[in-house]
Amino acid sequence: MKTKFNINNLIRENIKTLKPYSSARDEYKEVSSDMVFLDANENPFQNGVNRYPDPQQNKVKTQLSKLKGIPTQNILLGNGSDEVLDLIFRAFCEPNQDNIITLPPTYGMYGVLANINAIENIEIALEHNFQPNVDSILSVANKNTKMLFLCSPNNPTANSFEAKTIENLVTNFNGLVIIDEAYIDFSEEASWLSRLDEFPNLIVTQTLSKAYGMAGIRLGVCYASAEIISILNRIKPPYNINELTQLKALKRLTNPQDVSEEINRILEQRDWLISELNKIDVVEIVYPSDANFILAKVDDASKRYSELINKGIVVRNRTNQPLCNNCLRFTVGSQMENIKLIAALKAL
Ligand SMILES: *Cc1c(COP(=O)(O)O)cnc(C)c1O
């Protein structure tokens, strides 16, 4: 039976009582040009980055808020999704005591972060159709199970989990459910952002690394209840998003039509790649894709992987992942890159 959700039952004891670091910029926030700032031991000579960045990234969050229709108090930014996920672990999982559930084959970082934080990772493999097994997940959870990670669209399988399956899990799982939507902009499925209000235990993560084309600036986004966001804010490094990243992100987020144009081109290329891959002898199965990559089963993944490397093309060999025997993962590249890939595969 699911108990009534109370975040205080999940948060680590030491985090509950933590007194956060208060930075100079936290104590005095007004930024007007005629003020004299002698509070943070900065170098006074202007070069664009001589001042500490805004620790709350208000401009970036305000723009994200407009784009996504989510209030800024429900948004936290991290140095990539990786930092966001690490903060969630450190806020809610007691080392050597708590556990999480992940659903392989999936993004490797959840397991790595569990390891780093000394948290047991209970793995419940996806079904053969790459959908979660709800009964197994709910029945393995115990009183120390703090979080369930759902990656949808999932990496490396490229499919989305069915909405009713996700709803069932968010409703009945006794802990936080983190939906990693790194690839949501390539999918026709609706984002779970619109349902954040309904579920106090739901955390949605997104990133500027994929559809937004900014893997180099490291910006991950976490959306959750104001209560969860305020807990994460208390433990985040004060200046975790640097000034260059904030400026670049703001510029990109102010031109969302450029992003959607690129997404459309990638989706066109994805369709083309899928149809071409299906014609290739060594390719046995091309799985449907809701992301900017394609998982395909070939005759001998390790052999084909090396042959492609020798032709100067690097793909991802996923053959050692559960359910991915002899599978390669192809990122959808530019038209030229995709033509080269298909020509190389044809020549094998
Ligand atoms: C690429 C990817 C991310 C992005 O991570 P960043 O640290 O934001 O670059 C997150 N989740 C999944 C499943 C990914 O494949």
Image: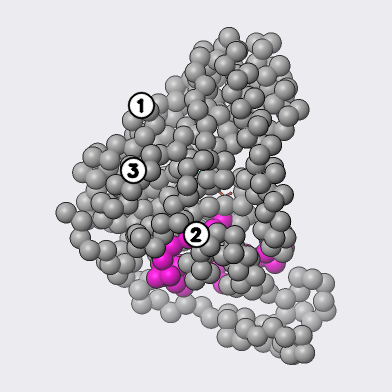
Q: Which residue is identified by label 3?
A: 164
Q: Mark 3–mark 2 contact, CB under 8 Å?
A: no
Q: Position of residue 43 (x, y in %)?
A: 77, 79
What residue do we see at 24% from left, 45% from top? 138
Q: Can residue 118 be seen in this view?
A: no
Residue kind at label 3, given as amino acid type: Lys
Residue nearer the viewer, 211 or 141: 211
For marks 1 and 2, the one nearer the N-term is 1
Q: Which residue is identified by label 2?
A: 222
**In the drawing, what numbered circle is on residue 128?**
1
| Mark 2 C-beta to ligand 1 under 8 Å | no
What residue do we see at 67% from left, 58% from top? 253
Q: Is mark 2 on a helix, strand or loop?
A: strand
- Name which quarter of the figure residue 12 lies in: bottom left
Q: What element carries label 3?
A: helix
Residue kind at label 2, given as amino acid type: Cys
Q: What element carries label 1?
A: loop
Q: Is residue 84 visible?
A: yes
- Name which quarter of the figure residue 63 lies in: bottom right
Cα separation between marks 3 and 2: 22 Å
Residue kind at label 1, given as amino acid type: His
Magenta-colored span: 220-246
User: How many residues crowd mark 2 within 10 Å: few (<14), some (14–19), many (20+)?
Assistant: many
Cα separation between marks 3 and 1: 18 Å
Q: Where is residue 141 in the image (x, y as percent from the top left)?
A: 24, 48
- Rendered view: 274 above or below 208: above
What residue do we see at 33% from left, 42% from top? 165
Q: Where is residue 315 in the image (x, y as percent from the top left)?
A: 61, 28
Q: Is residue 210 left or right of residue 192?
A: right
- Rendered view: 143 above or below 26: above
Residue nearer the viewer, 310 or 297: 297
